[in-house]
Structures are given as structure tokens and as C-alpha cells.
Amino acid sequence: MRQSGFDVDALADVAERLLPGSGRPRVERTPTGGSTPVYRIARDGTTLYLRLAEDAEDDPFSEALVHNLLRARGVRVPEVVHVEAFNPRLGRGLMVTSEIAGIPLSQDWRDVDIGQVLRAAGRDLALINDIGVDGFGWVRRDRPNADRLEAELPSLHRFVFDEIESHLAALPIFYTYDEIRLIHRAIRLWDGLLDADRGLLAHGDFDTVHIYHRDGAYSGIIDFGEIRGTDRYYDLGHFALYDGERFPGLALPHLLAGYDEVFPLPPDHEYRVRLWSLLIGIRALARTVGREHAVEAQRHLLRAIKNAVVVLP
């Protein structure tokens, strides 16, 4: 039996080895996890999550190392239960983790003290962004049994600007000439903020989908499938880009308040955060070109990019 291209019997066999109890384990694909398929495996009241590597050539050890490093610092992320460099029946490596209690803030935020949850998440995010990475860009997945995080590129500028021209080329579809000129001007004026001399870990896809709470109490952060080496402000910029999309009101100030408790933010932090929002937004907008059902996403990104430019005069 196959589910989304993968052998469910092979997945169940992994669950059989890891989960105590009797009867065949239950295996189901989660709605999250796009490039990295994620399965919920459960038996007799115990639930684990099985993450498959994106490609056959990728190993899961770098992602497992991130979980271990963060848990050692007290960050509330899933515990790594099992790692396989390559499972021949599934055709790729896999990692199995514990469950983070609760549900995403994006899914259930009514009657929740959003500020309390976000401030706690901000404190954890500051610790995530303090993990060092050798280099910039995507964290390498070809280092079996890695004991440190390595990225692909020697500079943050390379990571940002190697593909920016192709992304900017999509803007005439969405903006007027004068609006595009202001976007280009903001990037030129503020690219000096991308001055990091060492890489720091970024979650890479940080938003309220990945922040969990249980009955209104913050419980943790999930999904490190998009890890990369950047500077300290990438995740904050990504969060700012999508702020206001999931629920009414702005969540960023609460997140920043918690972050500032662990890492005091410098006076220019708003410019650094908004520059990343601008750069990430341009890339995200370019990737929507030609996609069906992308109108709502485009509408939000168009507003967010304009807002970032306003902050970067």
C-alpha cells in the first residue's frame, strides 16, 4: 500500500520498531510538511512524528543535530527518537521525533492570551537564532553523523543576491514603474545591513503555524525542515512578512518583546527585520507567478512588501 508515493507498510514497520503496544500502528500523512513529508505514527496512546528527507541524497543528521542542540539549551522543540541515514524500502533517510503537545496558534487563537504565547515563542526563537552555522544559505544535508552545522555559501550577500535579479524580474506583473523603483532603491540603500561575519541558525519558515500552545500555554516550536545559515533577523523578517495574515491584529510586537528578553535588540533592529521581510517577500511573490489559487497570497504579499518599503525610506 502506498500513500503520497511512499510505502505505508514500510512506514508502519518503522513504527512497529519504535512504538510499544499491540496491534498495527496507525500511520497518516499530516497536512503540514510539503518538501519534507511528515507522518503521524501512533499506537496505544503514544504518538510520534516521522519526517522523511526531501531527497534520496539528503541525510537527516543535520536536522537531528539542530533538535539536540536546541533541547540542550532548553528550547521547547521535539525530541529526536530515531534517525536513519537511509531506509532502502522508503528510498531516503528519516527522522522520528516526539510530539509537541497542543495545536498551532494559527489554528486556534480565539480566547487565547496571544501575547503570552508569542512572548514565550520569542524567547525560544532568540535561542534558536544563537546557534552558529559555518557559512550561509541552506544547511548542508550531505554530512552523515555531522557534529556541526555547515551551509553552502561563504557570505550572506551571496545567499541573498545570487538569485535576487530573477525574483525582481517578476515585479512588473504586480507593481507600477514608480513602485518598483522604490523597491530597488530600498534594497540598494539598506543592503549594508546584511553585514554578518558569521552564520546563525534560522528556522527558515517561522510563523504562527509552527508555534504550538496547549490550552493557551505555549508548548513549543516544530518543523526545522527549512533550516539555513543567515543572520539573527531572518526569522523575525519572515514572521513580520506574514504578520496579520492568519488572524487579526499584529503579533510581531509580542514576539519581539520575548526575543528582547534573551537578546537585547539594537536600535536599528526594525530596519533589519523589514529588509528581510522585503527580500523574502519578493522571492515569495515571484514564486506565485503562474500558480492557480494564489490570489489571496499575492494580495497579502503585495501589501507586506509595500509596508516594508515604507519603513525603509
Image (cartoon, rainbow, N blue to C red):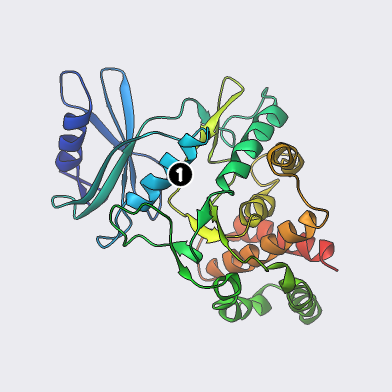
Place of residue 36 in the rendered image (x, y in percent of width and height, measured from the top left): 36, 52
Residue 303 in view? no
Q: Quadrant of residue 233?
A: bottom right
Place of residue 15 in the rendered image (x, y in percent of width and height, measured from the top left): 21, 33
| Along the viewing direction, whichever of 27 and 259 lies nearer the viewer | 259
Left or right of residue 297, residue 261 in this image: right
Q: Quadrant of residue 295?
A: bottom right
Place of residue 239 in the rendered image (x, y in percent of width and height, measured from the top left): 64, 49
Looking at the image, the residue that sits furthest to the right is: 313
Q: How many marks?
A: 1
Look at the picture and state if 72 lies above or below 65: above
Left or right of residue 71, residue 313 in this image: right
Q: Residue at x 31, y 62 (%)?
A: 142
Left or right of residue 52, residue 78 in this image: right
Residue 140 in view? yes
Q: Residue at x 16, y 26 (%)?
A: 24
- Which image quadrant: the N terminus? top left
Look at the picture and state if 120 lies above or below 305: above
Place of residue 225 in the rendered image (x, y in percent of width and height, measured from the top left): 43, 51
User: Which amino acid, by three-letter code, is at mark 1?
Assistant: Asp
- Secondary-structure class at tag 1: loop
Q: Residue at x 77, y 41 (%)?
A: 253
Residue picked out by circle 1: 223
Left or right of residue 175, residue 178 in this image: right
Q: Quadrant of residue 98?
A: top left
Crowd rating for badge 1 (residues with CA inside 10 Å; few <14, some 14–19, many 20+): many
- Which image quadrant: the C terminus? bottom right
